[in-house]
Amino acid sequence: MVITANRADRVILHNISWEQFEKLLDDLGDRRTARIAYDDGTLEIMTPLPEHKYFKEVIGVAVHDVAEELEIEYESYGSTTWRKRIKLTGVEPDNCFYFQNEPIVRGRLDVDLRQGDPPPDLALEIDVTHKSLDRFPIYARLEVPELWCYDEGTLRIYHLRNGEYVEAETSLALPLLPIRELPQVIAAHRTNGRLAIRRAVREWARMHKG
């Protein structure tokens, strides 16, 4: 095992077997703040900073508010560990949602890619360009159809096409909304508090509802 790190909030472990990866998940347990990503022997363990946590929460809540305002059924599984041994891949998104496949997982507590369940329809990643381990190949092998990547005030949308992510203008999960405007809606009301942000997001969703 080789250890490297380029920032104080993360550590990179190399030459980690799948068995070691799964044992580490068991040892760390569910009650932890650190998040992991695993790609064919390379493991990143990251402790989110306050800014990261803020935008993880505020954008995640915005997705809930938008879905409810548009009366779209959804399920949210937060930072669930998604993994596939056959792909030697695992990741914990900042948040993830089911929209198109929501009826398949509705109300379930045992969703697991290893037993043939579909991956989340949408995954959210914060500060993606500063993460040491590239998340895109991981999500591609897990076959997550859509990624939202927030970084420094910009929200980019990516669709999975032929095994690779391509930047897109609109969301597959929420096609009625100009999702890339969401950071500006949040920024305009951030200093007024969370309730002001939520009201603004709902009003924005209604405006585009048609």
Image (cartoon, rainbow, N blue to C red):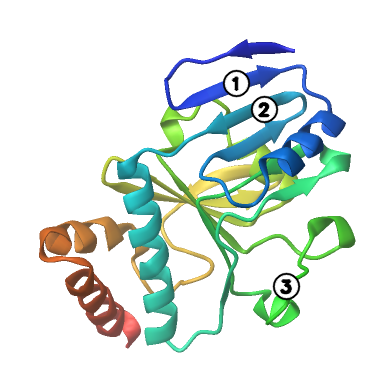
Mark 1 belongs to which amino acid?
Ile
- Residue placed under numbered mark 3 in the picture: 109
- First in sequence, mark 3 or 2: give its number: 2
Tell me residue 40's x, y (percent).
77, 28
Find the distance from the CA under tag 1 to the CA under tag 2. 6 Å
The residue nearer to you, when weighing 168 against 104, is: 104
Residue 141 shows in this picture: yes
Marks 3/1: CA distance?
Answer: 31 Å
**Secondary element at tag 1:** strand
What residue is rendered at 68% in x and 47% in y? 29
Please tell me whether mark 3 sits on a helix, a strand or a loop. loop
At 67% from the left edge and 27% from the top edge, which residue is drawn? 43
Q: Which mark is residue 12?
A: 1
Q: Which residue does the numbered mark 2 point to in the structure image?
A: 43
User: Residue sitting at 23 percent across and 67 percent down?
Assistant: 194
Q: Determine crowd level at label 1: few under 14, some 14-19, many 20+ residues with C-alpha closer than 10 A.
A: many
Q: Position of residue 174 (x, y in %)?
A: 47, 72
**Is residue 22 placed above or below 189 in the rendered structure?**
above
Tell me which label, 3 or 1, sits earlier in the chain: 1
* Three-letter residue code for mark 3: Leu
Q: Amino acid at mark 2?
A: Leu
Please say if the residues under marks 1 and 2 sit with CB atoms less than 8 Å apart. yes
The answer to whether residue 163 shows anywhere in this view is: no
Report the front residue among 23 and 99.
23
> Compared to 176, does 56 lie above or below?
above
